[in-house]
Amino acid sequence: MLVKGFEFNPSGEDLINGYLYPWVKQEELPWNDIPVKEIYGPSSDPWVVFYDVESRWHSRLEEKGAIKYTIYAFTLLTRVSNSKRVSRGAGTGTWQGQTGPEMIQDSKNGQIIGQSKMLAFKHPGSEANFGRWTMHEFSLSDDLIRSSGVPNAADLVVCKITKTVKKNNKKSGAQLPLAGISKLPECRTTEMFLPV
Protein backbone atom coordinates (compact mmCIF):
# COMPACT_ATOMS: atom_id res chain seq x y z
CA MET A 1 0.00 0.00 0.00
CA LEU A 2 1.30 3.44 -0.86
CA VAL A 3 1.73 6.09 1.79
CA LYS A 4 -0.95 8.77 1.50
CA GLY A 5 0.33 11.62 -0.63
CA PHE A 6 2.60 9.45 -2.77
CA GLU A 7 1.73 8.30 -6.26
CA PHE A 8 3.12 5.27 -8.08
CA ASN A 9 3.80 6.49 -11.62
CA PRO A 10 6.82 4.69 -13.14
CA SER A 11 8.08 5.26 -16.67
CA GLY A 12 7.92 2.47 -19.26
CA GLU A 13 11.65 1.92 -18.74
CA ASP A 14 11.15 1.60 -14.97
CA LEU A 15 8.28 -0.86 -15.46
CA ILE A 16 10.36 -3.09 -17.76
CA ASN A 17 13.70 -2.98 -15.91
CA GLY A 18 12.44 -2.65 -12.35
CA TYR A 19 9.26 -4.71 -12.32
CA LEU A 20 8.46 -6.88 -15.34
CA TYR A 21 11.91 -8.39 -15.98
CA PRO A 22 12.55 -9.17 -12.27
CA TRP A 23 9.00 -10.56 -11.91
CA VAL A 24 9.49 -12.86 -14.92
CA LYS A 25 12.74 -14.11 -13.35
CA GLN A 26 11.03 -14.47 -9.93
CA GLU A 27 13.37 -11.95 -8.32
CA GLU A 28 12.54 -9.50 -5.56
CA LEU A 29 10.68 -6.37 -6.68
CA PRO A 30 11.36 -2.86 -5.34
CA TRP A 31 7.65 -2.60 -4.40
CA ASN A 32 5.40 -5.64 -3.99
CA ASP A 33 1.93 -4.12 -4.30
CA ILE A 34 1.34 -4.83 -8.01
CA PRO A 35 -1.32 -7.57 -8.11
CA VAL A 36 -1.43 -10.50 -10.53
CA LYS A 37 -4.79 -10.51 -12.33
CA GLU A 38 -6.47 -12.42 -15.15
CA ILE A 39 -7.14 -9.49 -17.49
CA TYR A 40 -8.15 -11.59 -20.51
CA GLY A 41 -10.78 -14.35 -20.51
CA PRO A 42 -14.53 -15.03 -20.32
CA SER A 43 -14.97 -13.59 -16.79
CA SER A 44 -12.57 -10.67 -17.13
CA ASP A 45 -14.58 -7.47 -17.46
CA PRO A 46 -12.25 -4.91 -15.86
CA TRP A 47 -14.81 -3.79 -13.26
CA VAL A 48 -15.08 -7.43 -12.16
CA VAL A 49 -11.33 -8.19 -12.26
CA PHE A 50 -10.51 -5.12 -10.19
CA TYR A 51 -13.49 -5.14 -7.82
CA ASP A 52 -11.25 -6.14 -4.91
CA VAL A 53 -8.72 -3.36 -5.47
CA GLU A 54 -11.19 -0.51 -5.89
CA SER A 55 -9.86 1.10 -2.70
CA ARG A 56 -6.21 0.43 -3.59
CA TRP A 57 -5.77 2.45 -6.77
CA HIS A 58 -2.13 3.36 -7.33
CA SER A 59 -3.12 6.91 -8.33
CA ARG A 60 -6.21 9.09 -8.47
CA LEU A 61 -6.30 12.25 -10.56
CA GLU A 62 -9.12 14.76 -11.00
CA GLU A 63 -9.13 16.71 -14.25
CA LYS A 64 -11.59 18.24 -16.73
CA GLY A 65 -14.74 17.07 -14.95
CA ALA A 66 -13.53 13.49 -14.58
CA ILE A 67 -11.70 11.29 -12.09
CA LYS A 68 -8.98 8.97 -13.38
CA TYR A 69 -8.02 5.94 -11.31
CA THR A 70 -4.88 4.05 -12.33
CA ILE A 71 -3.69 0.64 -11.21
CA TYR A 72 -0.88 -1.64 -12.39
CA ALA A 73 -1.18 -5.42 -12.70
CA PHE A 74 0.84 -8.36 -13.97
CA THR A 75 -0.96 -10.79 -16.26
CA LEU A 76 -0.52 -13.72 -18.61
CA LEU A 77 -1.44 -13.21 -22.27
CA THR A 78 -3.66 -15.88 -23.79
CA ARG A 79 -3.12 -16.96 -27.38
CA VAL A 80 -5.68 -17.89 -30.00
CA SER A 81 -5.28 -21.66 -30.35
CA ASN A 82 -2.39 -22.67 -32.61
CA SER A 83 -1.52 -19.01 -33.25
CA LYS A 84 0.86 -16.27 -32.13
CA ARG A 85 -2.08 -13.87 -32.05
CA VAL A 86 -3.17 -12.69 -28.59
CA SER A 87 -6.80 -13.27 -27.62
CA ARG A 88 -7.99 -9.94 -26.22
CA GLY A 89 -11.52 -10.96 -25.28
CA ALA A 90 -12.44 -10.00 -21.72
CA GLY A 91 -15.86 -10.79 -20.27
CA THR A 92 -18.55 -8.91 -22.19
CA GLY A 93 -16.07 -6.94 -24.30
CA THR A 94 -12.68 -6.76 -25.94
CA TRP A 95 -9.45 -4.85 -25.34
CA GLN A 96 -8.97 -3.19 -28.74
CA GLY A 97 -5.66 -1.77 -29.93
CA GLN A 98 -5.49 2.02 -30.12
CA THR A 99 -1.85 2.39 -31.15
CA GLY A 100 0.86 0.22 -32.65
CA PRO A 101 3.77 -0.94 -30.50
CA GLU A 102 5.96 1.81 -29.08
CA MET A 103 9.54 0.69 -28.44
CA ILE A 104 11.02 1.36 -25.00
CA GLN A 105 14.76 2.01 -24.71
CA ASP A 106 17.14 1.70 -21.79
CA SER A 107 18.32 5.27 -21.16
CA LYS A 108 21.78 4.06 -20.11
CA ASN A 109 22.74 2.15 -23.27
CA GLY A 110 20.00 2.83 -25.85
CA GLN A 111 19.09 -0.88 -26.07
CA ILE A 112 15.45 -1.74 -26.86
CA ILE A 113 14.17 -3.43 -23.67
CA GLY A 114 10.48 -3.76 -24.46
CA GLN A 115 7.40 -2.26 -25.98
CA SER A 116 4.12 -0.66 -24.97
CA LYS A 117 0.72 -0.95 -26.65
CA MET A 118 -2.32 1.16 -25.83
CA LEU A 119 -5.72 -0.55 -25.76
CA ALA A 120 -9.26 0.53 -24.88
CA PHE A 121 -12.00 -1.70 -23.49
CA LYS A 122 -15.01 -1.85 -25.82
CA HIS A 123 -18.25 -3.37 -24.51
CA PRO A 124 -22.01 -3.10 -25.07
CA GLY A 125 -22.63 -1.27 -21.77
CA SER A 126 -22.67 2.43 -21.09
CA GLU A 127 -19.61 4.37 -19.94
CA ALA A 128 -21.93 6.08 -17.45
CA ASN A 129 -22.41 2.71 -15.74
CA PHE A 130 -18.97 1.18 -16.16
CA GLY A 131 -16.54 4.06 -16.72
CA ARG A 132 -14.10 4.29 -19.63
CA TRP A 133 -11.17 1.87 -19.38
CA THR A 134 -7.82 2.19 -21.15
CA MET A 135 -4.67 0.11 -20.78
CA HIS A 136 -0.99 0.33 -21.63
CA GLU A 137 0.43 -3.18 -21.91
CA PHE A 138 4.22 -3.49 -21.43
CA SER A 139 6.13 -6.52 -22.70
CA LEU A 140 9.79 -7.56 -22.86
CA SER A 141 12.01 -7.26 -25.94
CA ASP A 142 13.15 -10.43 -27.71
CA ASP A 143 16.64 -9.99 -26.17
CA LEU A 144 15.26 -9.83 -22.62
CA ILE A 145 12.91 -12.75 -23.30
CA ARG A 146 15.90 -14.87 -24.35
CA SER A 147 18.15 -13.69 -21.49
CA SER A 148 15.43 -14.43 -18.90
CA GLY A 149 15.65 -18.17 -19.63
CA VAL A 150 11.91 -18.43 -18.93
CA PRO A 151 9.96 -20.40 -21.60
CA ASN A 152 6.76 -18.32 -21.41
CA ALA A 153 8.41 -14.91 -20.85
CA ALA A 154 6.85 -13.54 -24.07
CA ASP A 155 3.38 -14.07 -22.55
CA LEU A 156 4.07 -12.28 -19.27
CA VAL A 157 3.26 -8.56 -19.22
CA VAL A 158 2.64 -5.67 -16.84
CA CYS A 159 -0.32 -3.39 -17.52
CA LYS A 160 -1.16 0.17 -16.52
CA ILE A 161 -4.95 0.34 -16.44
CA THR A 162 -6.88 3.59 -16.12
CA LYS A 163 -10.57 3.90 -15.33
CA THR A 164 -12.10 7.31 -16.10
CA VAL A 165 -15.47 8.33 -14.67
CA LYS A 166 -17.26 11.63 -14.99
CA LYS A 167 -17.58 13.38 -11.65
CA ASN A 168 -21.39 13.45 -11.82
CA ASN A 169 -21.38 9.62 -12.26
CA LYS A 170 -19.05 9.27 -9.28
CA LYS A 171 -21.52 11.19 -7.10
CA SER A 172 -24.49 9.16 -8.29
CA GLY A 173 -22.73 5.91 -7.48
CA ALA A 174 -23.37 4.58 -10.99
CA GLN A 175 -19.79 3.87 -11.99
CA LEU A 176 -19.71 0.24 -10.84
CA PRO A 177 -22.56 -2.16 -11.61
CA LEU A 178 -21.55 -4.62 -8.88
CA ALA A 179 -25.03 -4.67 -7.38
CA GLY A 180 -26.21 -6.58 -10.45
CA ILE A 181 -23.52 -9.25 -10.14
CA SER A 182 -24.81 -12.07 -7.97
CA LYS A 183 -21.52 -13.96 -7.70
CA LEU A 184 -18.16 -12.59 -8.67
CA PRO A 185 -15.84 -15.09 -10.33
CA GLU A 186 -13.08 -16.53 -8.21
CA CYS A 187 -9.69 -15.05 -8.99
CA ARG A 188 -7.06 -17.54 -10.02
CA THR A 189 -4.09 -17.88 -7.77
CA THR A 190 -0.83 -16.11 -8.37
CA GLU A 191 0.91 -19.43 -9.04
CA MET A 192 -1.03 -19.82 -12.29
CA PHE A 193 0.78 -16.83 -13.76
CA LEU A 194 4.27 -17.39 -12.43
CA PRO A 195 6.91 -18.17 -15.01
CA VAL A 196 7.55 -21.85 -15.60
Image: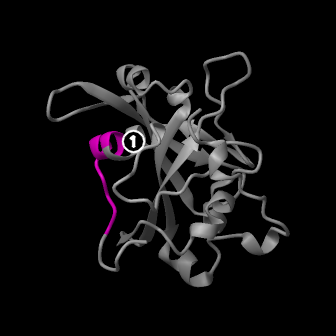
Q: Residue at x 47, y 42 (%)?
A: 26
What percent of the width, then of the height, locates residue 123? 68, 49
Q: Residue at x 70, y 50 (%)?
A: 44
Q: From this viewpoint, which residue is outermost toward the top? A: 82
Res 118 visible: no
In the displayed structure, would residue 49 be above or below residue 93? below
Using residue 87 as the reference point, say whether residue 73 is left or right of it: left
- Which corner quadrant of the image does residue 107 belong to? top left
Tell me the kind of residue under disc 1: Pro
Q: From this viewpoint, which residue is outermost toward the left? A: 108
What percent of the width, then of the height, locates residue 178? 73, 71
Q: Quadrant of the C terminus?
A: top right
184 magenta-colored: no
Using residue 26 as the reference point, say whether residue 51 is left or right of it: right
Marker count (numbered) = 1
Secondary structure type for disc 1: helix
Res 166 visible: yes
**Mark 1 surroundings: few (<14), some (14-19) or many (≥20) residues within 10 A:** some
In the displayed structure, would residue 183 be above or below residue 25? below
Q: Residue at x 52, y 47 (%)?
A: 74
What percent of the width, then of the height, locates residue 88? 64, 36
Using residue 81 as the reference point, say whether residue 145 is left or right of it: left
Q: Residue at x 64, y 67 (%)?
A: 51
Instruction: Please give the range of residues in magenta.
Output: 7-17
Q: From this viewpoint, which residue is outermost toward the bottom? A: 171
Q: Quadrant of the N terminus?
A: bottom left
11 magenta-colored: yes
| Residue, disc 1 | 22
In the displayed structure, would residue 110 be above or below residue 17? above
